Amino acid sequence: MIKTGFHHLLRDAARKFPTNPAISFGAETMAYTDLWKGVLGLAAELGDMDLGRDDRVAVYLEKRPETVTTLFGISAAGGVFVPINPLLRPHQVAFILVDSGASILVTSADRLALLAPSLGTAPNLKHVIVTDAGDLPVLPGIEVHAWTGRPAPDGFRPHEPLDVDLAAILYTSGSTGQPKGVVLSHRNLLVGAESVSHYLCNSDRDVILSALPLSFDAGLSQLTTAFLVGAHVVLLNYLLPQDVPRLCLRHGVTGITAVPPLWIQLADITWPDAARQQLRYFANTGGRMPKAVLDRLRWQFPQATPFLMYGLTEAFRSTYLDPAEIDCRPDSIGKAIPNAEILVLRPDGRPCEPGEEGELVHRGALVAQGYWKDPARTAERFRALPGTEQNWRPAEIAVFSGDIVRRDEDGFLYYVGRRDEMIKTSGYRVSPTEIEEAAFETCLVQDAVAVGLEDERLGQRVVLVASPLGAGPLDIVALLNGMRQRLPLYMMPSQILERPSIPRSPNGKFDRVLLRQELAP
């Protein structure tokens, strides 16, 4: 059957591999046919809540079977799923609920207790589904439902979308401080699954570890690439490095995708021989893999093929390095993934020469639809590609990444840096403005500037330069404690430096370039 919807990945897998394990979590394993039945049941319940086509449903859960069921159930009901990183604080979640206009929220009892004081700011929110409820709370103007797990009624038919219909909104940090919602179509998700699964050579014999958040495009990809081929996904809410080898041994994991900070931890622990030998591939995303770590992983997993990948939420995956090239080009981000073209362009839109630095521009079926309700920022990043206009059609829209790269004589790409001020740490793009706002809200600082400094483990580490408000020294302990109430751990500064004043550029803005130069080792 033709796949036009995100949930068709699971539908077709349930037909072709009904008894294959689809997901495992803790001691529980669900076969494809059982997972699909749960998806249809939830889709029917969402329909009873008057979920309409393109209505948004927010999902604020850690990884568990209900999370997977919800993502695919929303699609089967005709809605748009909005997965929220479980590390985010309540005020950040509330912003996404308001910005997305979500009418339904699926969450757990403990998370709802934290969110409840903020839900009044989300006027479109009408229903909350609680996955593990005891006594349901009373929320003004909101119906609260317990997760039932009921099957769909006889004759229920899931929604049949066009592949260009909206499927998901993934929120990523924005340069102005507030996160921005990247809008993805069903086609974006399906083509991404086909492309990545193709070069990873995934099959129904694979067991894939889901170690990244499902709100992260690479984390969601663990589900889509697996379900495309009937593979088995093991859900992991990461706790300790030692948990990973035990889980891999227990389930026979054959594929892992992670970000450099996690790989650095996994490279330095002891793995059971069976877990080491059964791994077929390991893949890196979210930042450059240090060569020493790559060498250690290749020794740790002698049977595994390494894949070094580059991507951005606005275009999912963009490049990967052919494993055969790793020894001679370990610093390269490779070439375009299947069904994508990567260009290196000058500011005037002309192609760069080999060795010349320019902006990475991605064209093809993976280019997202834009930023949710933000035409100005969409126009900045999603732009007409020069030379693609015809007298019978407008120019093709490509995504201009903001990343500076260069291409060598053989066509291999090398990452140089960011064009904007975004900080890339632990696989996340972090807004310096959001960190600075958290510092200002403590009422302890006069000025604050967050910058990213190169770090082998994190890609970049966050450093906050601040001047105290009023007389006396800056209370760094109180500042850190106050910021922890506003920011998830990955956004927190690794270091706070006190300065009586912070340098500014001639136009009066903080001189971030000068600060980075002064602070660089």
Image: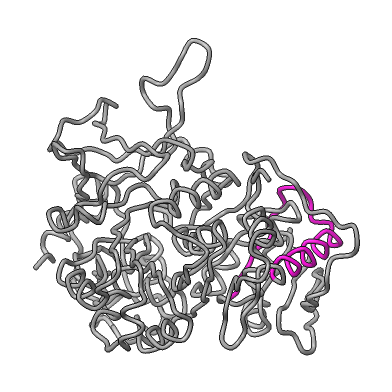
Q: Residue at x 44, y 46 (%)?
A: 315
Q: Which residues are magenta?
A: 35-61
Placement of 106 over or under 124, stated as above or below: below
Looking at the image, residue 517 sits to the left or right of residue 212; the answer is left
Q: Is residue 226 magenta?
A: no
Placement of 146 over or under 73, stated as above or below: below
The mark total stands at 0
In the depicted view, which residue is nearer to us: 212 or 473?
212
How is the structure coloured here?
one colour
Residue that extends furthest to the left in the rendered view of this protein: 521
In the depicted view, which residue is nearer to us: 346 or 437?
346
Residue 178 visible to the viewer: no
Provide residue 490's location: percent of width, then percent of height: 37, 73
Provide residue 516's location: percent of width, then percent of height: 17, 60
Residue that extends furthest to the right in the rendered view of this protein: 154
Placement of 158 over or under 207, stated as above or below: above
Q: Is residue 44 magenta?
A: yes
Q: Residue at x 54, y 58 (%)?
A: 229
Q: Residue at x 46, y 86 (%)?
A: 250
In the depicted view, which residue is nearer to us: 18 or 408?
18
Placement of 163 over or under 202, stated as above or below: above
Provide residue 300's location: percent of width, then percent of height: 24, 78
Looking at the rendered image, the quarter that the N terminus falls into is top right
Looking at the image, residue 279 sits to the left or right of residue 451; the answer is right
- In terms of image quadrants, where is residue 295? bottom left
Provide residue 363's location: percent of width, then percent of height: 41, 35
Looking at the rendered image, the quarter that the C terminus falls into is bottom left
- In terms of image quadrants, where is residue 98? bottom right
Residue 425 visible to the viewer: yes
- In terms of image quadrants, where is residue 18? bottom right
